[in-house]
Image (cartoon, rainbow, N blue to C red):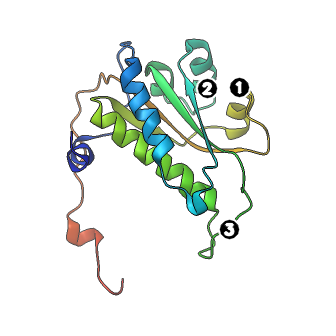
Amino acid sequence: METMQAMRERRSVRHYTSKAVEPEKLNAVLESVRLVPSRHNDQNIRCIVVRDPAVKKAIHEQANTQPMVEEADTLLAFVATDALDFVMPCGQYGYTADMYLALGYAILAAADQGLDSCIVCAFEETAVKKILNVPCECRIPCMAVIGYGDDPSPRKVKKELDQLISYEAF
């Protein structure tokens, strides 16, 4: 699949079948995470792959009742490992940009592999860090599930380009 096609076709899927993600497809998604750009090429990322049903259940309990956390075959937790105090000149923490780039690459790679995905941002970070044995000095700003969707709902309508883009000023 071409990148633009993956962007046009991917959608947030909130219900999944029990079908396992094939190792080669998961590896393609993980390779996309390895290739993601990061500020200053810090590569301050660890991606934790969670497939154990008991661990997913424990995380689901900390994820504000989002059933896809437990239903999907695979949960990816994006962990910022260092340079957490670096603030970019725009006032934002640099690690958040790195983690969300990694998440974006992963969900597009998943679409390219014929997999469905959903971003998970509503969760209790401290509890999830404890479940995954993530050191307290690291951060988990986002997670994503990937798998085979069981959700026939259509992709949500996106705004037209002229509603999102302006040139030279707001």
Q: Determine which residue is flagged by label 2.
A: 59
Image quadrant in which the C terminus is located: bottom left
Answer few, some or many: residues within 10 Å of disc 2's Cα (few below 14, many 20 plus, some between 14 and 19): many
Answer few, some or many: residues within 10 Å of disc 3's Cα (few below 14, many 20 plus, some between 14 and 19): few
Type of amino acid under label 3: Val
Q: Tag 3's secondary structure?
A: loop
Identify which residue, 73 or 59, lies in the foreground.
Answer: 73
Q: Residue placed at 62% from the left, 61% from the top?
A: 94
Look at the picture and state if 147 lies above or below 8.
above
Type of amino acid under label 1: Ile
Query: Residue 164: which quarter of the image?
Result: bottom left
Query: Residue 77: which quarter of the image?
Result: top right
Q: Is residue 84 left or right of residue 163?
A: right
Look at the picture and state if 69 lies above or below 57.
below
Q: Determine which residue is flagged by label 1.
A: 131
N-term-proximal mark, 2 vs 1: 2
